[in-house]
Image (tube, grey):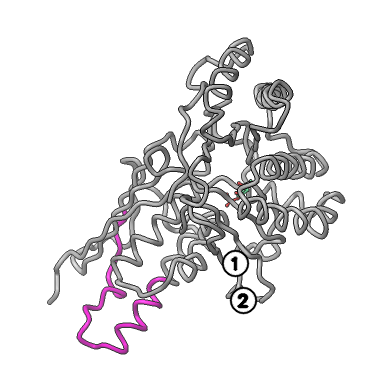
Amino acid sequence: ADTKVYRASTTAPVNIAVVKYWGKRDPKLNLPTNSSLSVTLSQADLRTLTTASCSSSYTDGDSLTLNGEASDVSGARTQACFRELRSRRAALEAVDTSLPKLSAMPVKLVSENNFPTAAGLASSAAGFAALVKAIALLYELPDSPSELSLVARQGSGSACRSLFGGYVAWRMGDKDDGSDSKAELIAPAEHWPEMRALILVASAAKKGVSSTSGMQQTVATSGLFQQRISKVVPANMAAMEEAVKGRDFAKFAEVTMRESNSFHATCADTYPPIFYMNDISKAAIRAVEAINAKAGKTIAAYTFDAGPNCVVYYLEENASTILGTFYPVLAEVTGWKEGTAGIKSAVEIDG
Ligand code: PMV
């Protein structure tokens, strides 16, 4: 019998949305209520490294070790990824019967993040993207990154965008089976090599309201949300694609900030309201406004996900202004430098 261990390793980067995914029209398939667009950060700074192996000699079933600790794989999202990938492998094995029957073997995953998992830095996006890429590599699947994004999406919505570097759109699609709800490349990182991101860790604590329940509550109770998905996001998607393609930073920045504000406004509009930003987050917004006012033009943009941490986008030519201004302003905010909170070094945009 074949007791060989088959193995493959890969990495996937973190992405930070500039047009936000917020709302599921199908929670089971992770189909969104709107399209979204993100910037992929450098893997040197933020990434998940995953090794996938399989063998008929593994007797404990599928398993995942994350940062050295056993992690649950029985969740519906993880199971959906395993099922999809196995069925794609099984299809190959059915055509070429000489292939080893990897689809029938238990899978062992070992994953490491090079950043704190609990810091609220979109670790699930890199995590599920790396899981899907590693198993696809192990199974020698011929699927394109867009095809694999259909699988990663079922793990975590935002994960579908981490299959690409650079500027990535997730088209919401309109099919009920989700077969057209996938990621596509808008522009590679080299298209805009001057783009930088600064990550401000306002709190390393795990977020209060998970994205899944926050979205569910927003869809169910916010009136503002209807306006957002029907008018605001479609206009922002179009403007953002134009800004990226034309390397128009001022436009990119304005849409990024308006988008973050719009998303957090719908959260505050739910009943009861959800607040992801704290006083340190608000100080970061004021600091970006001060930087832009002093420059007389928009050279920095803030954005916040489902937590208090801030990502500031800027161009390399303004690095000293951004980094030099941020520290003194935020150093005065109580709590900013305590514990693990602080300024994370600037990271590059990944290819
Ligand atoms: O992929 P999820 O379910 O963790 O949701 C991500 C939601 C936001 O980070 C707030 C927005 C986004 O588009 O990444």
Q: Where residue 94 is drawn, which disc sits there?
A: none
Name the residue at 70% across, 51% down: 215
Whether residue 80 is visible here, answered yes or no, is no
Disc 2, SS: loop
Q: Where residue 177 is drawn, which disc sits there?
A: 2
Determine crowd level at label 2: few under 14, some 14-19, many 20+ residues with C-alpha closer than 10 A.
Answer: few
Name the residue at 34% across, 64% down: 135
Name the residue at 85% across, 54% down: 227
Whether residue 43 is visible here, answered yes or no, is yes
- Is residue 325 in the magenta section? no
Query: How many numbered callouts?
Result: 2
Residue 253 image-quadrant placement: top right
CB of mark 1 within 8 Å of CB of mark 2?
yes
Q: Is residue 146 left or right of residue 309?
A: left
Determine crowd level at label 1: few under 14, some 14-19, many 20+ residues with C-alpha closer than 10 A.
Answer: many
Q: Which amino acid, mark 1?
A: Leu
Above or below residue 7? Residue 285 is: above
Disc 1, SS: loop
How far across and how far down the image is residue 201, in percent? 54, 27
Q: Is residue 41 left or right of residue 20?
A: left
Instruction: Locate the N terminus and report the quarter of the image it occupies.
Output: bottom left
Q: Which residues are magenta?
A: 85-109
- Is residue 105 in the magenta section? yes
Q: Is residue 211 left or right of residue 2?
A: right
Name the residue at 49% across, 62% down: 152
How far across and how far down the image is residue 134, in percent? 34, 60
How far across and how far down the image is residue 275, in percent? 73, 34
Residue at mark 2: C-beta within 8 A of ligand 1: no
Q: Where residue 29 is drawn, which disc sits there?
A: 1
